[in-house]
Amino acid sequence: APLNATLVVEADKPGPRIDPNIYGQFVEHLGRGVHEGIWVGEGSPIPNVRGIRSDVVAALKRIKVPVIRWPGGCFAELYHWRDGIGPRDQRPRGVNAAWGDEPETNGFGSHEFMDLLEQIGAKAFLSVNLASGSTAEAQTWLHYLTDPATSGAGAERARNGHAAPYAVPYIGIGNENWGCGGNMTADYYADQYRQYLSVLRPFGTLIATDANADDYAWTETLLKRALYRHSRSTPLAWINKQPQLAMMSLHFYTFAGDDWDTKSPAVGFNETEWARSLLRTQKMDELITRHTAIMDRYDPARQVGLAVSEWGTWWSADPKRPSNLYQANTLRDAVIAGLTLNIFQDHADRVRMANLAQMANVLQALILTRGAQMIVTPTYHVFDLYQGHQGAKRVPVSVSAPGYRVDDVDLPSLSVSASLGEGGRLTLSIVNLRANDDIRIGIDLRGVAARTAQGRTVTAAAMDAHPDFDTPDALHPRPLAGLALQPQRLEVTVPAKSVNVIEINP
Ligand code: AHR
């Protein structure tokens, strides 16, 4: 018999808007993330538009990918943008020193990235280079991309095929500057940020780099030293309260435990590893809460957003090619995606962007390719199901359900998030974390007069069920059967280990 749970959804209390950018993506020159995953070149037998593969663009367009961060990651800190412009046959060949010295053709550079965005309908998040670059290099890059064709920089861009200026709404100042991005202390980075700010401020929204998981001291130092303009005579005295950073970012990965030594295989894991992975995922809530508490002290009006600019699962690497970070994507990844997106939605007042690591062929990818073949992953299906939340207003939900214990791991059985969208559409995303138990849920719908309800579910019999190139539809979303709707009440049974989204309309 299924377990029982109850929910109260207060649709009469709409809260903050869920920024569509939290369903954003991250693309890095790493393994087959760019080369093959996106870029095949104009001469390729794989169908493409100006070298960008059409099957991938169609899949990403369908789920309304809002924003893409590029060119890395650690790669960004070694990237020199001039290598990636001009005639492709004259671009320098290089090696990807960030990721296993693999060959880098530079065939996919700034114009190709902007073309990808245009084809998908997504916005640019450009990550500039601090470790091996300079303010001058970042400045000339932004001039090149955004100046009118009547300027010298814009004329060079026009000669390279694009007269109209590109839009670069988001500029990331470095990547993991405490690590691969220059091995900096927080104080040193904050001062670097101030210098980049003085040069790049006119070009777009600046995002300060990436607190590492629970490094709260990084956030504290960054905000103390860089959030506001300081007086020249007393460098740490604020002279006004206009924030100088639009967002600060956070990076956090999921393993089957609490550190990098507890990676589990992507397939073939047991229920303990399942539960430990979900517990680690739940930590995102604590991280956001605690970083937000620090932000609240410096920025009580909540003008500054949090961008979780890298998140996702990181399973054991293929020992034969450890630097390509390709991994299978299973039902566990789907459940982790659902849990994480629910957490972002619940923190919509601060979390204004997030970027899944990574979009294609790397870590928790949406898309996997094998030559000309492409499959979408269970994680992709979750992003598809969650589209109804994009731009909607979060509404409060309270959950009453038994806990879920596996060995020494205590988890909730359910994670639920709800939002109110256009025309009074209520979207409910419900994740059942339990590996073996269906849950019957009675939902009290306050403030709606529901007339129709439809649900879809991503689930399977095995925890590590996954699509493959020969069985591509293994986890395709199915209708959620047996919804019993009254105007202010819904009853539904969610299957064991599943991600479910229900849309209720007046
Ligand atoms: O996403 C893979 C790598 O993880 C990125 O290059 C780096 O920023 C992070 O450590």
Image (cartoon, helix red, strand yellow):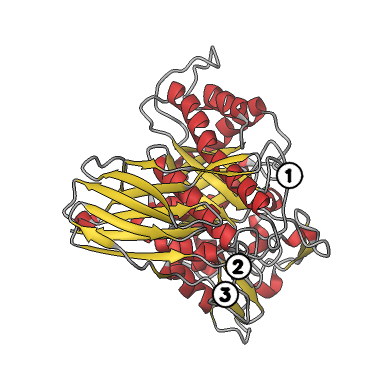
Q: Which mark is residue 375?
A: 3
Mark 3: secondary structure:
strand
Disc 2 packing (10 Å; few <14; some 14–19; many ≥20):
some
Q: Does residue 467 appear left or right of residue 481 in this picture?
A: right
Which residue corresponds to mark 2?
465
Left or right relative to 349: residue 35: right
Q: Amino acid at mark 1?
A: Trp
Three-letter residue code for mark 2: Ala
Up the image or down, 393 lies above or below 331; here it is above
Q: Residue at x 59, y 28 (%)?
A: 216
User: Which residue is denoted by mark 1 in the rendering?
Assistant: 260
At mark 2, the secondary structure is loop
Q: Earlier in the sequence, mark 3 or mark 2?
A: 3
Q: Visible in this render: residue 114?
A: no
Q: How many angstroms separate mark 1 from mark 2 (CA)?
A: 24 Å
148 or 477: nearer the viewer: 477
Q: In which quadrant is the N terminus drawn?
A: bottom left
Q: How far is mark 3 from mark 2, CA to CA?
A: 14 Å
Q: Are marks 3 and 2 in contact (CB under 8 Å)?
A: no
